[in-house]
Image: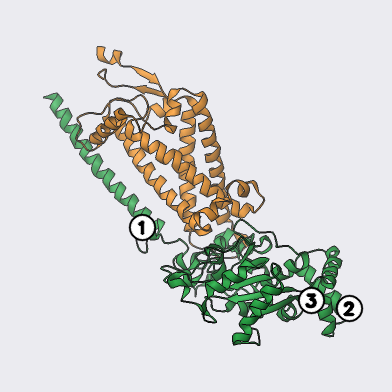
Chain colours: A orange, B green
Amino acid sequence: MELTQKQTAVYVYEAPVRLWHWVNALCIVVLSVTGYLIANPLPTLPGEASDWFVMGYIRFAHFAAAYIFTVGFIGRVYWSFVGNRYSREIFHLNLFNREYWKELVHEMRWYAFLAKEPKKYVGHNPLAAIFMVGIVVIGSLAMMLTGFALYAEQSGPGSWQDTLFGWLIPLVGQSQDVRMWHHWGMWIITIFAIIHIYAAVREDIMSRQSLVSTMISGWRMFKDDRD
Amino acid sequence: MIETFYDVMRRQGISRRSFVKFCSLTASALGLGPAVVPQIVHAMETKPRIPVLWLHGLECTCCSESFIRSAHPLAKDVVLSMISLDYDDTLMAAAGHQAEAIIEETIEKYDGNYILAVEGNPPLNEDGMFCIIGGKPFTEQLLHAAEHCKAIISWGSCASWGCVQAARPNPTQATPIHKVPGIPAKPIIKVPGCPPIAEVMTAVITYMLTFEQIPALDRQGRPKMFYSQRVHDKCYRRPHFDAGQFVESFDDEGARRGYCLYKMGCKGPTTYNACSTIRWNGGLSFPIQAGHPCIGCSEDGFWDKGSFYQHTTDTHQFGVEANADKVGLAAAGIVGGAIAAHAAVSALKSARKQGGDNQ
């Protein structure tokens, strides 16, 4: 019992970071489902066109969630400037640090059942850091750029979406190519989400620190006092 | 002194009344207000006819076939009254050395003042031997004529993007005009489509003639007035798309009721062209109206974007016939399976560890 009293807890994720995380998660679910349905629409409906507006609502949900996702991302970037040191971690990768690579190998050995126990981390572990920068930051940026470029096609020349993002279409090839990569992005993020949820739950149970509850309360709890 | 348009029209027995009517019609065809009519009249009365050299590279002549079917303005009016079509091997009476001499004559006489219209493109492989005009590679003729022209019109998808002869693996290395090495820095107006709409072709020429400037172009060099919206944006079946009513196969009830062809692979949402507004054959119809999905013929590399009847593009980078949905679903399945296995081993490991701790 004495041991548990000595266990430390660190306040890692401030309220805006936690709010962003869950809003972002909800947006990704809505965006992936509606995005899939835009590419592969539901079975056809009967009657007159004026009877329904199904595709219209699906697309509306997609665009609304996309705007919330974008505003959330901008807010998250802002918070990395004013928040605590852990709020900057998601935009940062220590690729030129020898220590980082050593710890990354250790983390991979832990997942491959080769290391006996994982190291403790207040913020992201080295493996998580790669995925956070690669998928959450770069992946989100790629989806927002291609998404707004596609959105600019309907808002038309002269719209701010077209002025800011329209250049992307000839750069990638043509409209269809942008659609294809935007669609690939959805699958990459979906697969990341599956791995992310599994890893978070598993780490919460098996590692030496709290994970899922940290993203709810903001506090990182450690299960032991060893290094 | 070159004749003005008005001179030519009067010589052909066209009354002044008919001439003014023609100008009004042209103004409305270009979407311009009545205030512009006097401007067009003035231009036609005073401006010399623009000499045009119309060259043909690797192509199927479908652009010419489309052009001669223009209804507003009639192609004959364009060719006989509006421009001075000095060379077009498909339409001209002259042949052989006589025809080829006209090119040199035009270049000499109107150096820097004629329009070079190119239908088709040059193959660059084997020093251009896959397309020989008058004993020389087409590339040479093209570069020579381009050197002295005022502006270049790239007719159709061949000249604009490369089209079928540039489709993978492109054995002759057919290259669109703007990518030909050594092409002089002249304004290039792309008028893509396989073929382009007849009225779009004649309107581009009429515009350049009337205002003595090239039309406003979009990022990819296409005239904004015809290529700024997608076929999808003005499609008359669009309400069925928004409603979620689709043709699922060509003989179903949806096809009979004229539902949206999106699921049949319609490329309307990714194709910039004026088919759904101007339509074809004098505004009679266009592919979607006839019940067939748009194949996206005015888009860059449309032959290489997978089946015409499939909406999601195949991704050649990831193997033959793979698309985002197939690979994505398979990958999600594999990852799910791997996670289940990993979780099972994890549970076993921690159970063994706990067992060890208890002993």
Q: Classify mark 3: helix, strand or loop.
A: loop
Q: Chain of mark 1?
A: B
Between the C-alphas of marks 1 and 3, the distance is 59 Å
Disc 2 residue type (three-letter): Arg
Quick one: label 1 or label 2, which is nearer the N terminus? 2
Front position in the image: B292 or A185: A185
Q: Which mark is residue B2?
A: 3
Residue A69 drawn at (x, y percent): 52, 40
**Residue visible at 64% across and 71% down in the picture:** B116
- Image quarter of residue B64: bottom right
Q: CA distance from mark 3 to mark 2?
A: 23 Å
Instruction: Identify residue type, mark 3.
Output: Ile
Side of A68 where B352 appears, left or right? left
The residue depicted at 66 percent of the width and 65 percent of the height is: B151
How many numbered discs, if any? 3
Q: x, y percentage for residue B106? A: 68, 76
Which chain does the numbered disc 2 sit on? B
Residue reaching furthest to the front: B108
Q: Is residue A215 visible?
A: yes
Sequence-first disc among 3 and 2: 3
Secondary structure under tag 1 reads helix
Q: Are marks 1 and 3 in contact (CB under 8 Å)?
A: no
Report the residue marked by disc 2.
B17
Tell me what residue is drawn at x 71 percent, y 68 percent. B113
Give percent across and percent down for residue A81: 51, 26
Q: Closest to the observer: B175 or B69?
A: B175
Quadrant of res B38: bottom right
Foreground disc of the pair 3, 2: 3
Residue on which the image places disc 1 = B318
